[in-house]
Image (spheres, rainbow, N blue to C red):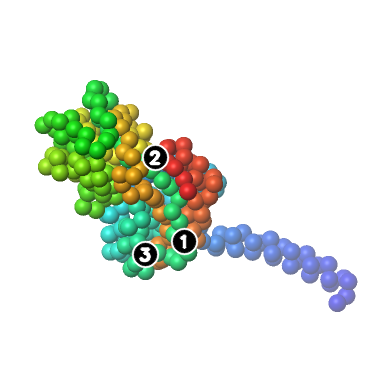
């Protein structure tokens, strides 16, 4: 090609590329925020993790909080979701057994403990021990717990009270809630004189105080697994999951009192 034509042609190609580049950028689909279904006890910590993720330049995850049992049933019923974070292993097992968890994405990354709480102004004293006088401490009031028929916090509470030999003395005085936060609210408002919740819940509500901590041997280990839902097609889903289980992500949860694995 003559040199007289080569230079104008190169200039034309460069100009054309400059014109087409913005169009290519505009055509790229925007990143979508992943939908996260998370156990109720994770409200403050998961929102903090989502904010930290957004600060890194990602779309902020959309989070729905409820009891793990309710969330698992929603996923099994086909509710749109990208990530599931359960407050126990069995409900994640239930979802995974239906083929609803993406292979290789399940990780157990958080721990918690179980505590007995009372309203902040309460003066009740009770040592957590076998055959403790829990019914006497309740008087005519009720014990606030998450529903022991399916909600992890309630299941752990029943295990602990049963192994300590006091479940039969209080099961007629229960005030079961749809989540651990519902139980927490009953005690915080003074509607129940005592309640059993996670240590992180008690820490999150200034309206309650911890009466005692249940021995780890009194209940199954409190373990939180996270996984990507098999139907998710959002590239942000596994990216956010990997952030949650990273050293940086776990540090966020430790600030709210969670143990990490």
Residue position marked by numbered label 3 in the rendering: 96
Secondary structure category for the residue under label 3 = helix
- Residue shown at 74%/67% (left/top)? 13
- Look at the image and tell me whether residue 104 can be seen: yes
Left or right placement of residue 117 versus residue 237 in this view: left
Q: Nearer the viewer, residue 74 or 16?
A: 74
- Residue shown at 18%/30% (left/top)? 137
Mark 1 or mark 2, which has the lower sequence index? Answer: 2
Q: Evaluate if marks 2 and 3 touch, with contact meaning CB atoms under 8 Å apart.
A: no
**Residue 26 in the image: x percent, y percent?**
56, 59
Within 10 angstroms of label 1, few (less than 14), some, or many (20 or more) residues? some
Disc 3/disc 1 C-alpha distance (Å): 11 Å
Residue position marked by numbered label 1 in the rendering: 105
**Residue 35 in the image: x percent, y percent?**
40, 55
Disc 1/disc 2 C-alpha distance (Å): 23 Å
Within 10 angstroms of label 3, few (less than 14), some, or many (20 or more) residues? some
Q: Which mark is residue 44?
A: 2
Left or right placement of residue 106 versus residue 145 in this view: right
Marks counted in the figure total 3
- Residue shown at 28%/47% (left/top)? 156
- Residue shown at 34%/45% (left/top)? 217
Disc 2/disc 3 C-alpha distance (Å): 26 Å
Q: Nearer the viewer, residue 105 or 218?
A: 218
- Residue 55 lies, with reference to residue 238, above or below; the image says above
Secondary structure category for the residue under label 1 = loop
**Residue 109 in the image: x percent, y percent?**
45, 50
Mark 2 or mark 3, which has the lower sequence index? Answer: 2
Within 10 angstroms of label 2, few (less than 14), some, or many (20 or more) residues? some
């Amino acid at each position: 090609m003559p040199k007289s034509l080569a230079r104008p042609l190169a200039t034309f190609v460069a100009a054309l590329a400059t014109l087409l580049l913005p169009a290519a950028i505009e055509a790229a689909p925007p990143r979508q925020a992943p939908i996260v279904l998370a156990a109720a006890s994770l409200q403050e910590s998961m929102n903090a993790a989502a904010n930290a993720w957004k600060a890194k330049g990602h779309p902020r995850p959309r989070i729905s909080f409820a009891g793990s049992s309710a969330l698992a049933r929603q996923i099994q019923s086909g509710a749109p979701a990208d990530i599931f974070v359960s407050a126990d292993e069995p409900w994640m097992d239930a979802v995974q057994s239906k083929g609803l968890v993406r292979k290789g994405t399940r990780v157990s990354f958080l721990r918690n403990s179980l505590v007995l709480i009372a309203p902040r102004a309460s003066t009740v004293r009770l040592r957590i021990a076998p055959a403790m006088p829990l019914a006497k401490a309740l008087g005519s009031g009720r014990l606030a717990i998450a529903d022991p028929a399916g909600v992890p916090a309630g299941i752990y509470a029943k295990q602990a009270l049963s192994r300590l030999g006091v479940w039969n003395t209080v099961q007629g005085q229960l005030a079961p809630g749809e989540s651990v936060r519902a139980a927490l609210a009953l005690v915080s408002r003074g509607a129940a004189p005592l309640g059993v919740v996670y240590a992180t819940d008690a820490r999150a509500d200034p309206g309650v105080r911890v009466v005692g901590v249940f021995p780890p041997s009194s209940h199954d280990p409190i373990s939180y697994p996270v996984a990507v839902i098999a139907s998710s097609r959002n590239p942000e889903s596994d990216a956010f999951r990997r952030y949650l289980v990273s050293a940086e992500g776990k540090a966020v949860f430790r600030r709210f009192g969670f143990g990490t694995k």
